[in-house]
Image: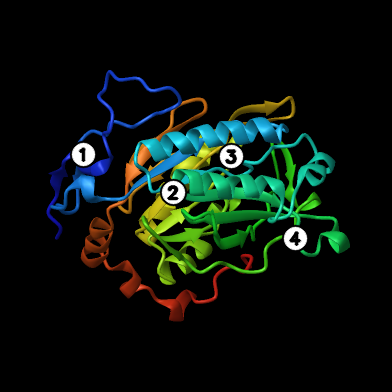
Amino acid sequence: MLGFIVRPPHQLLSLLLCPGLRIPRLSVLCAQPRARAMAISSSSWELPLVAVCQVTSTPDKQENFKTCAELVREAARLGACLAFLPEAFDFIARDPAETLHLSEPLGGNLLGKYTQLARECGLWLSLGGFHERGQDWEQTQKIYNCHVLLNDKGSVVATYRKTHLCDVEIPGQGPMHESDSTIPGPSLESPVSTPAGKIGLAICYDMRFPELSLALAQAGAEILTYPSAFGSVTGPAHWEVLLRARAIETQCYVVAAAQCGRHHEKRASYGHSMVVDPWGTVVARCPEGPGLCLARIDLRYLRQLRQHLPVFQHRRPDLYGSLGHPPS
């Protein structure tokens, strides 16, 4: 049986700001003490700090970059080693034709600006969903939804192309047919070592498929990232529940940078960017509107939790090894 003790709030989140101090575009969750599974003795100031950015992208790529760059620079100023941007950080278009028109290859001008930004700020960037013209653009005239990870030198260290495309029709939210303009990615990306820990890359709708998160955790992921643009109906119903479930079942940190607000007359997003720890506690959260929140990643706590609650050792792949097929 596990003993529960109160863990100090400074170990839940970096409280860089006094409660009364206001900094534009920045939000930090002041977490209250919660019952936790074990104590951690390491100083929170020794733990890596990550920033989760929330934006309202529009079809204006130049303005979107200006907004994202401002948040990334603020994250660097506050000491973050890694900043996460949401899906469609580059733009959100009005229709598939505009999406294809505004898309670029990875070697294009926009990604070049972000590589310079990473070098300038000296931090890693998770670019959560870039509308990528791949090498097959001329043949397919379709794009990939590509999660790009840059290191602090501005080099591309990993790319993941979204494997689960969002083709749904939710009453009250409007239809979404991502496959009209987008090709599903062919494979998962192995977790990548970063200053915050080993990161497993995913995008938005991927969070509905626990097989993906379990595969990344089994491959060594310590942080799962779900950059997203959740809708106004599915957001309140499913967003936090799914993120906390993915954290609990994989015993990973989950980082979810989100789009928020109205992008144009045809689309709006739920927001509520957050960080969830391996116990399933939301340790950082953005309020309404563009901004960022901060959290510290405590890998010692993660490892102790996995030791005390060794669910991966108790799995029975002999009973349910081939999941992922439609129900019979």
Residue 103 in picture, x, y percent from top left: 76, 47
Q: Earlier in the sequence, mark 2 or mark 3?
A: 2
Q: Earlier in the sequence, mark 4 or mark 2?
A: 2
Near mark 4 (Cα within 10 A), the count class, few <14, some 14-19 or many ≥20, is: some
Where 190 sits versus 4, above or below?
below
Q: Is residue 285 left or right of residue 164?
A: left
Image quadrant in which you'd find residue 221 = bottom left
Amino acid type assigned to the residue bearing label 1 in the image: His
Q: Colour mode?
A: rainbow
Near mark 1 (Cα within 10 A), the count class, few <14, some 14-19 or many ≥20, is: some
Per the image, the residue denoted by label 2 is 123
Amino acid type assigned to the residue bearing label 3 in the image: Phe
Give the spatial CA distance, label 3 vs label 4: 25 Å
Residue 168 visible here:
yes
Per the image, the residue denoted by label 1 is 10
Who's the residue at 64% across and 43% down the image?
88
- The numbered dot on residue 141 is none
Amino acid type assigned to the residue bearing label 2 in the image: Leu
Give the spatial CA distance, label 2 vs label 1: 23 Å
